[in-house]
Amino acid sequence: MTALITGGSKGIGYGIAASLLKEGINVAFTSRRQEDADAAAVELSKIGPGKVIGIAADVRDFDAQQK
């Protein structure tokens, strides 16, 4: 199972990702900047057995999501 979290590199989204990873659920999350996504993915990968990937995407920009 994989969960998709928008805004998972900080705050509440990060906490949700951490909780899911502890339960063995794979996590894909977005962040506006790839650098933030990469840094969070490194830290989150240390938390639990689930796999994690961070993706740069600004979910506020509909046109950017169409690419």
Image: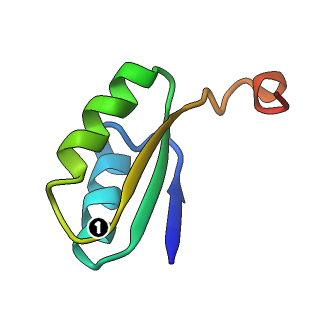
Query: Which corner quadrant holds the C terminus?
Result: top right
Image side of residue 65 versus residue 31, left or right:
right
Disc 1 element:
helix
The image position of residue 57, as x and y in percent, is: 60, 30
Residue at the (26%, 30%) spot, across then down? 39
Is residue 14 positioned above or below 20 on the image? Answer: above
Q: Residues within 10 Å of mark 1 (few under 14, many from 20)?
A: many
Q: Position of residue 25 (x, y in %)?
A: 38, 74
- Residue at 61% x, 26% y is 58
Residue drawn at point x = 22 percent, y = 72 percent: 22
Residue 60's image quarter? top right
Q: Quadrant of residue 61?
A: top right
Q: Position of residue 44 (x, y in %)?
A: 23, 50
16 and 46: which is toward the camera: 46
In the shown orientation, is residue 56 left or right of residue 36? right
Residue 26 drawn above or below residue 62: below
Amino acid at circle 1: Leu
Relative image position of residue 15 (x, y in whole percent): 27, 54
Q: Which residue is mark 1?
A: 21
Quadrant in the rendering for residue 21 = bottom left
Q: Looking at the image, which residue is at 19% across and 67% down? A: 48
